Image (spheres, rainbow, N blue to C red):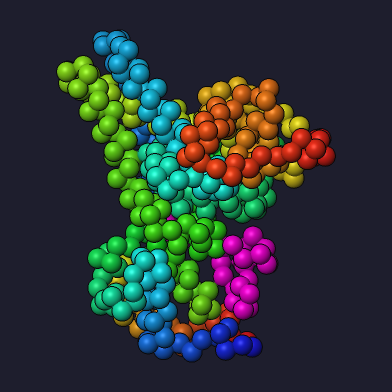
Amino acid sequence: MYLESIDSRYYETPDGRRGKKAIQSDFLRRIQIRHFLLFTVLPPIGTAVAIALLFWYPLGWPVFAIFLIMWSITSVGQTLGYHRLFAHASFKAHPAVRAALAIAGSMAGLGSLISWTAMHRRHHECSDKPGDMHSPNLHGETRSARLRGFVHAHFTWMMGHEYPNVNYYTPELMSDYRLLWISRHYMTWIVLGLVIPTAAAALITGTWIGALNGFLWGGAVRMFVVSNAMWSLNSFLHIWGSKPYKCRDHSGNSGLLALFSWGEGWHHNHHAFPHSASFALTWYRVDPGYYLIRLLQALGLVWDVKTVPAQRLAERAA
Amino acid sequence: MSASRSPVLTVDSVRQHSLLFLAKTLHTDPGKIDADADFDRLGLDSVMAVALILDLEEWSGLDLEPSLLFEYPTINELARYVTASASEQPRANVA
């Protein structure tokens, strides 16, 4: 990423060229609407069907276990892979771990690896200011404006938004052939994330209804739960939540959300110290994602795990 | 202004620049990329297509639409379009 920037719209290269940091076009909007319909609108519909089916067919432990496993795999892919490893380089990992996390994160259906990472880096650069594509705080101060801001930040922003320049925001991913290949095959990983729970449930239960429940709970419901947890960071946690550190945006913490999002609920901590692999920052806050990083480190699969010294935390205390 | 800031836009220079970008991204030799092959066949998805257009914008100083790669689906067709449009719009990087 070039160091010298003009504003949130343009960057300048060392040899004096000017490039766009983000663009908008009808062509991109069509892609965004298609993605929105497939992975934002369909999962809640699938979830409603899954819940309605419970009246006739009880869930059963195998399908519930499949839901939990798929929820864990894709949540970990999101928080450890997309977020802590690729967007913020808060630790280093074996190439096989990098690939596995990239694929698991893709299955969540929140965007291809490179697009998501570029959007997330732009979110941090412009947090709660013009250019932040999913801030709830840029719609005005009236009650209805704040409600509009909340809905925008939670999910309607995905119907059409600025698209960041991946050459500017994610040059190292664009030049990593393996990760670019994984990112290009985004749809394949999503389909795989639907086929695996369906096939597993079919094999275990031996019934068509079992397969359908596997698809619905391991696919649609799991996508609904994981995506809503991630979107809640943009909506709830850029309006409410505790703010224990000095930070220039409106991000907040929620220990409750952290429990259901593998530690992502410590969103304010993350904005205050974006390069820390630990979002909890302290031992008494629960951060399952960080515990998993420590476990992988003990196994020699990840290393150079970045943390924030206690003195630095004290200096930034609000 | 340095020469690198305002490249001379010819079909050949745009073709060369596009080939270098794609070769770097696809991890291959520029000589192995067919400038008459469809971008689809070269393995470009929408993310890479937009990345190529934005890279060409930064390099040339022109305003280019992301959908261009679908209207001009080979490197040669794109290079001809970019060169032609250079005479019709001001370039941001030319002093």
Residue A202 x/y as whole percent: 20, 23
Depth order, front residue of A300/A218: A300
Quarter of the image with the C terminus of chain A in it = top right
Q: How many marks?
A: 0
**Which residue is at 29% across, 28% downward?**
A197
Residue A137, can we see it? no
Q: Is residue A202 left or right of residue A78?
A: left
Q: Is residue A65 left or right of residue A318?
A: left
Residue A32 x/y as whole percent: 42, 50
As for residue B83 lying within the magenta part, the answer is no
**Which residue is at 64% across, 26% downward?**
A254
Q: Quadrant of residue A84?
A: top right
**Which residue is at 39% across, 38% downward?**
A104
Numbered range of the magenta stretch: A1-29
Q: Quadrant of residue A69?
A: top left
**Which residue is at 37% across, 87% downward?**
B12
Q: Is residue B10 left or right of residue A270?
A: left
Depth order, front residue of A260/A128: A260
Depth order, front residue of B69/A63: A63
Residue A126, can we see it? yes
Q: Is residue A301 left or right of residue A66?
A: right
Q: Is residue A213 above or below residue A1?
A: above
Q: Is residue A15 above or below residue B22?
A: below
Q: Is residue B10 above or below residue A44?
A: below
As for residue A20 lying within the magenta part, the answer is yes
Residue A190 x/y as whole percent: 33, 40
Q: Is residue A117 above or below residue A309?
A: below
Quarter of the image with the N terminus of chain A in it = bottom right
Residue A114 x/y as whole percent: 45, 53
Depth order, front residue of B51/B62: B51
